[in-house]
C-alpha cells in the first residue's frame, strides 16, 4: 500500500459540513477494473473498514507501475466529499518531496456529491519513484469510500514533471496511455450502491 493511501487509514478529525441529505443512502461502492488483466493482492476487512488492492497480472505491489486501491474508512465527523479530498491533498505533503494537485471536482450521483482529484508527487519519501494518483471520494455519514489509481513514474525534482530518460520513449508513451485510462477509471468505473436499488449504478 502506498504511503499516500496509508496515511488515509489514520483517524481524521475533520470539520463538519452538513448539507441537505439526499433521499437515498450509499450502502457501498464497487469498481470495474480497466480492461487489462488484474490480480487482487490485498484484501483486509473489519466491521467498519476495509482495503482492497489490485495490480496487473504478473506484477506485485513492489514492482508494479500501476496499482488500484479501494478503501472504506471511518471518519469522526460529517464532511463533504470535496473537503475530505482537500484534507487528503494536504496530508500528501507529508509523504512526498513536492506535491501538485488537480481538483477536487464534484460529480453528482443521485444527489450524492462525490469528488474526484489528482495528486502528483515528485518523489515518494523512501521510494525511488514519483506518482500520479487519480482519486475518487464518496461520503456517507461517518464513512468514507476512497478509490485511488496510482501510476508510478521516475522520480523528478518537481511534481507534475515527467523525468523519463531519452532512452525511455516507449515507457513515456505507455505512461501517457495509462494516465488517460486512470483518469477515466475513477470518473466512470467507480459504481455507487444505493439502498433503493439492488445493483450498483
Image (cartoon, rainbow, N blue to C red):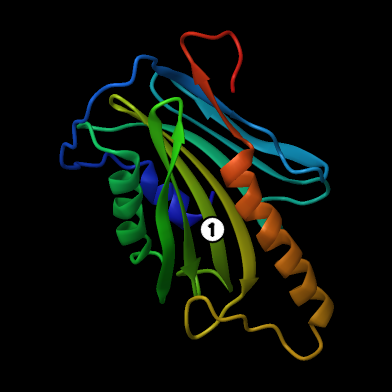
Residue in the image at 61% along x and 14% along y: 199
Is 23 left or right of 199, judged from the image as shown? left
Q: Residue 133, located in which quarter of the rendered image? A: bottom right
Q: Which residue is mark 1?
A: 133
Q: Provide the secondary structure element on which disc 1 rests.
A: strand
Q: Residue 188, located in which quarter of the rendered image? A: top right
Q: Position of residue 15 (x, y in %)?
A: 15, 42
Residue in the image at 45% along x and 25% along y: 110
Q: Position of residue 38 (x, y in %)?
A: 77, 41
The reply to whether residue 96 is visible in this rendering is no
Residue in the image at 55% along x and 81% along y: 161
Residue in the image at 56% along x and 66% along y: 131
Q: Position of residue 120 (x, y in %)?
A: 49, 67
The reply to whether residue 113 is visible in this rendering is yes
Q: Is residue 72 above or below residue 34?
A: above
Q: Which quarter of the image is occupied by the C terminus?
A: top right
Q: Position of residue 81 (x, y in %)?
A: 34, 40
Is 48 left or right of 18, judged from the image as shown? right
Amino acid at each position: 500500500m502506498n504511503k499516500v493511501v496509508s496515511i488515509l487509514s489514520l483517524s481524521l478529525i475533520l470539520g463538519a459540513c452538513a448539507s441537505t441529505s439526499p433521499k437515498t443512502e450509499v450502502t457501498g461502492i464497487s469498481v470495474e477494473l480497466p480492461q487489462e488483466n488484474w490480480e487482487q493482492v490485498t484484501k483486509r476487512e473489519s466491521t467498519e473498514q476495509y482495503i482492497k488492492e489490485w495490480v496487473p497480472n504478473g506484477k506485485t505491489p513492489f514492482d508494479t507501475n500501476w496499482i488500484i486501491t479501494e478503501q472504506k474508512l471511518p471518519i469522526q465527523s460529517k464532511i463533504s466529499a470535496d473537503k475530505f479530498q482537500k484534507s487528503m491533498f494536504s496530508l500528501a505533503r507529508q509523504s512526498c518531496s513536492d506535491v501538485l494537485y488537480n481538483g477536487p471536482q464534484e460529480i453528482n450521483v443521485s444527489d450524492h456529491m462525490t469528488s474526484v482529484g489528482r495528486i502528483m508527487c515528485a518523489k515518494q519519501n523512501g521510494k525511488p519513484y514519483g506518482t500520479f494518483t487519480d482519486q475518487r471520494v464518496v461520503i456517507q455519514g461517518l464513512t468514507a469510500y476512497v478509490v485511488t489509481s496510482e501510476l508510478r513514474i521516475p522520480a523528478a525534482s518537481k511534481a507534475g514533471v515527467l523525468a523519463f530518460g531519452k532512452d525511455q520513449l516507449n515507457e513515456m508513451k505507455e505512461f501517457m496511455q495509462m494516465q488517460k485510462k486512470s483518469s477515466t477509471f475513477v470518473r466512470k468505473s467507480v459504481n455507487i450502491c444505493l439502498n433503493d436499488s439492488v445493483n450498483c449504478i
